[in-house]
Amino acid sequence: MFPAAWELFTVRANPQRLWRYAMPVSFLMAHAVVYELIEWGAAELFGGDLGVAYLGTQGDEWDAQKDMGLATAGILVGLLLTLAFSSSSGSPPAPASVLPSVHDRPRDHRGPACS
């Protein structure tokens, strides 16, 4: 997921310096938090034994924190691998070529056609 987030932010936001690395990491970490909140909400909604079975924590009260910690570790490994593969070329990874967005295309300034 990290290379996809990296390219998304590079193409659409064009972050500079530290933000180039921090934005994709924060974006993916936020998704881990949202997933854990959805999981918690579903367990609360189901309630009782069904909610506990849905969570599958096996009594581990730190399961959500461990899941988010492992997600963060995976994100950082993705960052390091992205940087390692890009360092062989001597420059930060460049985004894949994408089609220009609707906002980049020239506009027709003649206005609507009159009949």
Image: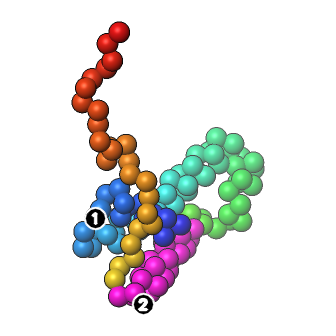
Q: Nearer the viewer, mark 1 or mark 2?
A: 2
Q: Residue sitting at 27 percent across and 23 percent down?
A: 111
The residue at which mark 1 appears reads as 15
Number of marks in the rendered image: 2
Q: Identity of the amino acid at label 2?
A: Ser
Magenta: predominant secondary structure element? helix
First of labels 1, 2 by sequence position? 1
Q: Front-most of 4 and 70?
A: 4
Q: Residue sitting at 31 percent across and 20 percent down?
A: 112
Relative to 1, is 39 above or below? above
Q: Residues within 10 Å of mark 1 (few under 14, many from 20)?
A: some
Helix or strand or loop: what does disc 1 sit on? Answer: loop
Q: Quadrant of the C terminus?
A: top left
How far is the residue under mark 1 from the one under mark 2? 22 Å
Q: Identity of the amino acid at label 1?
A: Pro
In percent of width and height, residue 15 lies at 28, 64
In percent of width and height, residue 32 lies at 51, 61
Q: Is residue 108 magenta?
A: no
What stretch of residues is rendered in magenta?
66-90
Q: Visible in this render: residue 24?
A: yes
The residue at which mark 2 appears reads as 88
Q: Residue sitting at 25 percent across and 68 percent down?
A: 16
Q: Is residue 76 magenta?
A: yes
In percent of width and height, residue 40 lies at 58, 51
